[in-house]
Image: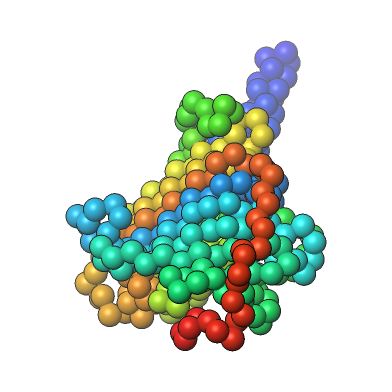
Amino acid sequence: MRRALAALAGVTVLVAACGQPSPSQRALSSTSSHLHDVHSGRLDMTMLASTATAASSVGEGFELAGLFAVATKKGRLPVADLRYTRITGAAHAQTRFISTGSAAFLGLDSGVYRLADSRVAGLRARGTAGKDAGLAGLNLDKWISHPVLHPAGTRDGVPVVRITGTLDPIQALNDMLSVASGLGAADEGSPTHLSGAAADRVRGAVRSSSVELVTGRADHLLRELHVEIRLAVSDADNLRSALGRLAGVRLTMGLVVTRPNQAVQVPAPAAARPASELPSPG
């Protein structure tokens, strides 16, 4: 009887253990659930489509770099001073997006222009601060399956861990495009969302993919995110119709948050010109 009870207890422990999330799953879930806790910081974000042998800064896509703070009240704009670089081959064209929380501006070679309210309506907070803005649009739990945990040293003096796993490329693409758009980096040459036949075409063209994120070991705040997707180009026209400028053999996406939750203040630029003087196309 004692032997039978011991065996039963062992089975019970094993079943309970099987129902528990692994440390890597807990770390991934905690990072995803704490994304709305990243309210501000220095952001460096890239999305780039290129050939397999192109240099890291050559291709089609964009870079976004600078300070940001998500809106703190419904209807408010984010606070941001971000330089947006459109990459076309080896050529880089830069603009600057400035937002004080109540007004937004666009910096061009010809000057700085205040943006009309209708142009920035989509950037205004729709709900509780941080719940639907900033990095909260990255549903990392849906991106990554079979996560694996690795040691990763420190970032900004904070102990961090690295998580790798199997990537859902469509979920990753859609979330990164959504976050970029929410930070003022909408690109007319790139899609804003992949669904239906377009998503199926891209998914069917994926030959390999990888994902790596770095997160705080204790605070679970996202510090880095790196994605690479390699596509077959046997049906290049279909890929171009789905991905626009982001169609390429290699698609890389990166996001780095430095000094999360630092205070960010952005003053309105001096001598900004009215929206009516914004060169066309704006």
Residues 188 and 132: in front is 188
In the current view of this chain or complex, which residue is farthest to the left? Answer: 53
Res 175 seen here: no
User: Residue 214 vs residue 239: left or right?
Assistant: right
The percent position of residue 268, horizontal first and vertical second, equals 66, 63
User: Residue 5 vs residue 248: left or right?
Assistant: right
Q: Is residue 222 above or below residue 150?
A: below
Q: Please identify the quarter of the rendering in which residue 15 is found.
A: top right
User: Residue 86 vs residue 217: left or right?
Assistant: left
The percent position of residue 250, horizontal first and vertical second, equals 29, 59
Res 217 seen here: yes
Q: Residue at 49% of width from left, 35% of height from top?
A: 162
Quarter in which the N terminus is drawn? top right
Q: Residue at 61% of width from left, 54% of height from top?
A: 68
Q: Please identify the quarter of the rendering in which residue 139 is found.
A: bottom right
In the current view of this chain or complex, which residue is farthest to the front? Answer: 271
Colour basis? rainbow
The percent position of residue 140, horizontal first and vertical second, equals 57, 51
User: Residue 278 vs residue 70: left or right?
Assistant: left
Q: Residue at 56% of width from left, 31% of height from top?
A: 156
Q: Is residue 260 above or below residue 159?
A: below
In the current view of this chain or complex, which residue is farthest to the top? Answer: 2
Q: Residue at 66% of width from left, 42% of height from top?
A: 262
Q: How many marks?
A: 0
The percent position of residue 206, horizontal first and vertical second, equals 33, 62
